[in-house]
Image: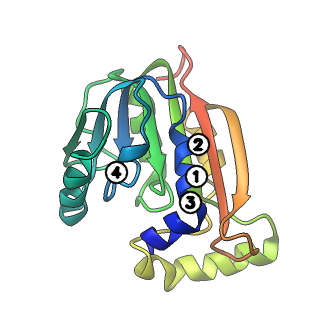
Amino acid sequence: MSKAMEQAGMAEHRRDLLAGLTGEVIEIGAGDGANFTRYPPTITRVLAVEPEHHLRRLAEAASQHAPIPIQVVAGSAERLPVHDESFDAAVSSFVLCTVPDPDAALAEALRVLRPGGRLRFLEHVRADTSGLVRVQRVLDATVWPLLVGGCHTGRDTQEAITRAGFTIEHLDRFLFPEARTPVSFHILGTAFRDSMSK
């Protein structure tokens, strides 16, 4: 399913997600390494954290084809295996819709970013009508997380990012696929950790 999404246009959104990044980056929930070949050469290194063994092995293989140094390590979004204020940017793509505790994951992202550090995110989100939100709730409470590796279609990720202490500086909303279905609502954006956030 992931490869079909990439071919249908998600690859362009991934490029936008990573464009302009610099310095040291932590990728939270790297999956199979789908982002790795799209990192710009302005990045000095990426630490890719992935909890699932099989996906981590795929990510390690993908890291060999990346244009920049990428180290793949075991760890969860809710407990990142790094020191405070270690990175210039954090990347989250289709992670906050999946992790058991997105608030804890966002608190960890805030912790590991240096003041002024950026969070780049590409996520499934809650629909924009009450009818579709109700459908998302039914899907999330029944079959969808089982079918798609724990994914939840109806989380209010934008609000969660703000609640964690980030300031959103850029946000695009889009449908993918373009039809209005319970699983087509997405956001792509950048938030930053200001010097007062801890």
> Badges 4 and 1: C-beta atoms under 8 Å apart?
no
> Badges 1 and 3: C-beta atoms under 8 Å apart?
yes
Look at discs 4 and 1 and give the one toward the viewer. Answer: 1
The kind of residue on which mark 1 rests is: Glu
Residue at the extreme bottom of the image, as rendered: 143
The kind of residue on which mark 4 rests is: Ala
> Badges 4 and 2: C-beta atoms under 8 Å apart?
no
**Label number found at residue 16:** 2
Q: CA distance from mark 4 to mark 3?
A: 16 Å
* Residue that appears at 71% across and 46% down: 172
First in residue order: circle 4 vs circle 1? 1
> Is residue 190 or residue 151 the one in the foreground?
190
> Is residue 115 or residue 7 the one in the foreground?
7
**Label number found at residue 30:** 4
Write down the residue under mark 3.
Answer: 10
First in residue order: circle 4 vs circle 3? 3
Above or below — where is 86 with respect to 106?
above
Q: CA distance from mark 4 to mark 2?
A: 17 Å
Q: Is residue 166 visible?
A: no
Q: Which image quadrant for residue 58?
A: bottom left
* Residue that appears at 30% across and 33% down: 68
The kind of residue on which mark 2 rests is: Asp
- For the residue labelled by badge 4, is the local secondary structure a helix, a strand or a loop? loop
Q: CA distance from mark 2 to mark 1?
A: 6 Å
* Residue that appears at 59% across and 46% down: 160
The kind of residue on which mark 3 rests is: Met
Residue 173: x %, y % from top left: 72, 52
